[in-house]
Amino acid sequence: MIPPLIAPSILAADFANLQRDVEILNRSEADWIHVDVMDGVFVPNISFGIPVCEAVNRHATKPLDVHLMIVQPERYIDAFARAGAAHPDRPGTITVHLEACTHLHRTLTQIRETGCRAGVALNPHSPVELLADVLDEIDLILLMSVNPGFGGQSFIPHTLQKIRKLRRLLAASGQTAFIEVDGGVGNDNVAALVEAGADVLVAGSSVFRADDPTEAIHTLKHFGQT
Ligand code: DX5
Ligand code: ZN
């Protein structure tokens, strides 16, 4: 089995020691650095915005995986691309929410034009079939396995069925896209998530609340091995 890509979320990092925590990720087996942007409108919480993304980018050596939990995300795509997501040596991803986009096709095109991978996130209630007519434009599909807005929530088990359904949808359409799962990911569900078809796992609390984040990333990536 191919090990999953691991994208630790800096939402769970120590913001007063952000450089230290980004450097821990640089030295670890993390594949991407997940950057959770919340506007207090699309989700009931405010995290941080463009300057913090720029600060992470100044110290990061891994691609940024920017998750925009904001309304009208098309207004900020170029800004987040410049803030590090479109870094020429380590291009990353910008993910927008289906529920926040009136013209999703146009927004995905706009993301790809910046040089980033184009991602779409689905809230727990949004069926994967809603993406059927836009799969051509998508590089990554992020399935929320909690209601977005906060770290440290419990994983919603129904996500496993959504992953399997999305795998089937991608196979039937002959399209490839990363399947990313975000929320409540940890040692207790990593095997089931990968078995269901997840490629990328976001992990906030399970990495940064661990005694040793480097070891926690290693354990997630190589689950099932002793
Ligand atoms: C939730 C965010 C997640 C969050 C995950 O709205 O999108 O990326 O940081 O945190 P954990 O892993 O603690 O559930
Ligand atoms: Zn996220």
Image (tube, grey):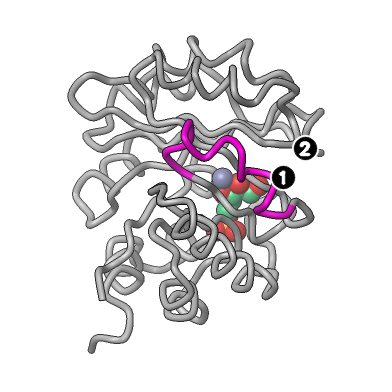
Q: Quadrant of residue 149?
A: top right
Q: Is residue 51 visible?
A: no
- Residue drawn at x 42%, y 78% is 195
Q: Earlier in the sequence, mark 2 or mark 1?
A: 2
The amino acid type, in three-letter code, at marker 1 is Gly
Q: Which residue is mark 1?
A: 149
Q: Please indicate whether residue 102 sits to the left or right of residue 135 in the image.
A: right
Which residue is nearer to you in this view: 137 or 94?
137
Any part of residue 92 in sight: yes
Task: Classify residue 134 as left or right of residue 201.
Answer: right
Asked whether mark 2 lies closer than 8 Å to ligand 1, one says yes
In this rendered view, identify the residue nearer to me: 32 or 93. 93
For mark 1, give the secondary structure: loop
Say if mark 2 contacts mark 1, CB within 8 Å: yes
**Label of residue 158 in the image:** none
Reading the image, the residue beneath label 2 is 43
- In the rendered image, the quadrant that contains the C terminus is bottom left
For the record, the magenta segment spans 127-140
Asked if the stretch drawn in magenta spans residue 139, the answer is: yes
